[in-house]
Image (tube, rainbow, N blue to C red):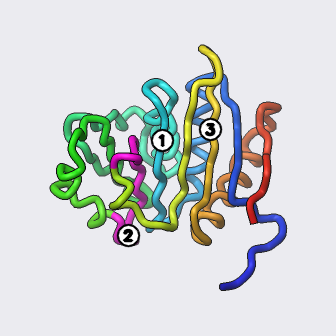
Amino acid sequence: MPSRKRSEVSRWEIRFRSAGHAQRIGTALGHALHAGDVVALYGDLGTGKTTLVRGIATGLGIPAGRVSSPTFVLIQTYVGRVPLVHADFYRLDDPRQLRDVALSDYCDGRRVVAVEWAEKAASELPQDRLDVCLAHHSPSMRDAVFIATGPKAVRLLNRAIEAYSAASASPTRRRVRHKR
């Protein structure tokens, strides 16, 4: 396995104050995404998962207003620079229901897949993916931790950080421990 460049990171933390800021982070991620990339989103209600996906859509050339939480249909597909599959498994109560969804069929290398409530789909997610863990820091602030779980996701994360840095000089941006 080739070694990573010293400047590559596999973990990135950022704090954001608004839905607009979350959408800008998602847009930078969307610009960095390629067909076959999978983004797994984790976090409580109201932490910004759908807002981040709206930003991803914008970065893929899909109007953010078209993206809604697919809570009742579970999966929606949007056409952009690369097709975006948006899954929301909030309403899945039984892991057996996931088999009927056939998430792995969407992870075929031809589209980007963003999965909300990814903990409910753990067995169906590819090992090499970008995990995004969102949490409430305070009533008006959220924390996001991006964790690349494989070499493809490391490259994605570094492209996203670069795109975000180029688009924003936000003082809330910060890198933390780099796992090597």
Mark on residue 178?
none
Could you tell me residue 141's position as x and y percent?
Answer: 64, 22
Mark 3 or mark 2: whose residue is earlier in sequence: 2
The image quadrant of residue 66 is: top left
Start and end of the magenta stretch?
Answer: 107-120
Tag 2, which secondary structure? loop
- Residue at 34% over, 47% down: 120
Q: Which residue is denoted by mark 1 in the rendering? A: 42
Residue drawn at x 34%, y 34% as measured from the top left:
68
Residue 138 found in image quarter: top right
Callout 1: SS: strand
Whether the residues at callouts 3 and 2 have beta carbons within 8 Å, the answer is no
Q: What is the secondary structure assignment of the residue under circle 3?
A: strand
Q: Which residue is mark 2?
A: 110
Residue 123 quadrant? bottom left
Name above or below for residue 45 compared with residue 122.
above
Question: Could you tell me the amino acid type at mark 3?
Answer: Ala
Tell which circle, 1 or 2, labels the residue nearer the N-terminal end: 1
User: Would residue 90 appear left or right of 31 to someone viewing this image?
Assistant: left
Residue 144 shows which numbered tag? Answer: 3
Q: Position of residue 117 (x, y in %)?
A: 39, 41
Report whether residue 94 is seen: yes
Dot 3 surroundings within 10 Å: few (below 14), some, or many (20 or more)? many
Distance from label 1 to label 3 (Cα)? 10 Å
Q: Say above or below: 89 vs 150.
A: above
Q: Amino acid at mark 2?
A: Arg
Quick check: 49 above or below 153? above
